[in-house]
Amino acid sequence: MSIAQNPTPHPMISTTDVNGADVYDYDGAHIGDIDHLMIDKKTGRIAYAVIGFGGFLGLGEEHYPVPWQSLQYDPSKGGYLVNVTKEQLESAPPRRENWAGDRSWEEKTHTHFGAPYYWMI
């Protein structure tokens, strides 16, 4: 699902438009879509886009949290660009059920994707 092209772009977007948005690598290959966002409760900053890829008709799809700072909106594609390969997603630090509350995991993940720590921006 691509984000609708808006003839008068503005800096705001609804989460309803982000969830399901296409994600492409910098070569233009579609690598998945944004399943949902993770937002820091205290600061309101988006910390991660959880990207779903693989599978067929939603079955067998894998979900990988990618630091939000790693994504860049591309109006010409109506989706997001990320300088990440499927291999990088698959080799990301393993996560436990409470991954979003594990600062050690977050540090490893941000380092893995070469993104600044969202809590220090």
Image (cartoon, rainbow, N blue to C red):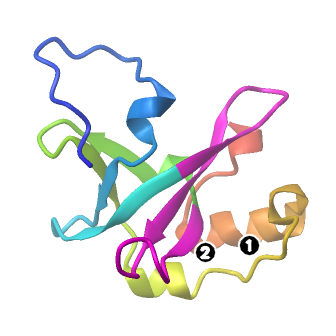
Residue occupying image coordinates x 62% and y 52%: 116
Q: Is residue 1 magenta?
A: no
What is the secondary structure assignment of the residue under circle 1? helix
**Is 74 situated left or right of 95 in this image?**
left
Residue 112 disc label: 2
Classify residue 12 by image quadrant.
top left
* CB within 8 Å, label 2 to label 1: yes
In front of the other: 107 or 38: 38
Instruction: Give residue 49's position: percent from left, percent from top.
Output: 55, 52
**Is 8 situated left or right of 81 in this image?**
left
Image height of 71 relative to 8, above or below: below
**Is 120 situated left or right of 92 in this image?**
right
Amino acid carrying label 1: it is Lys
Residue occupying image coordinates x 76% and y 37%: 40
Image height of 87 relative to 36, above or below: below
Amino acid carrying label 2: it is His
**Is 56 situated left or right of 39 in this image?**
left
Within-10-Å neighbours for mark 2: few <14, some 14–19, many 20+: some
Q: CA distance from mark 2 to mark 1?
A: 6 Å
Classify residue 84 by image quadrant.
bottom left
Q: Which residue is under mark 1?
A: 108
Instruction: Give residue 76's position: percent from left, percent from top.
Output: 11, 40
In front of the other: 33 or 56: 56
Image height of 9 relative to 85, above or below: above
Residue occupying image coordinates x 15% and y 46%: 77
Q: Which residues are magenta?
A: 36-65
Quarter of the image containing the C terminus?
A: top right
Instruction: Give residue 52's position: percent from left, percent from top.
Output: 47, 67
Residue occupying image coordinates x 69% and y 81%: 93
Residue 61 disc label: none
What is the secondary structure assignment of the residue under circle 2? helix
Within-10-Å neighbours for mark 1: few <14, some 14–19, many 20+: some
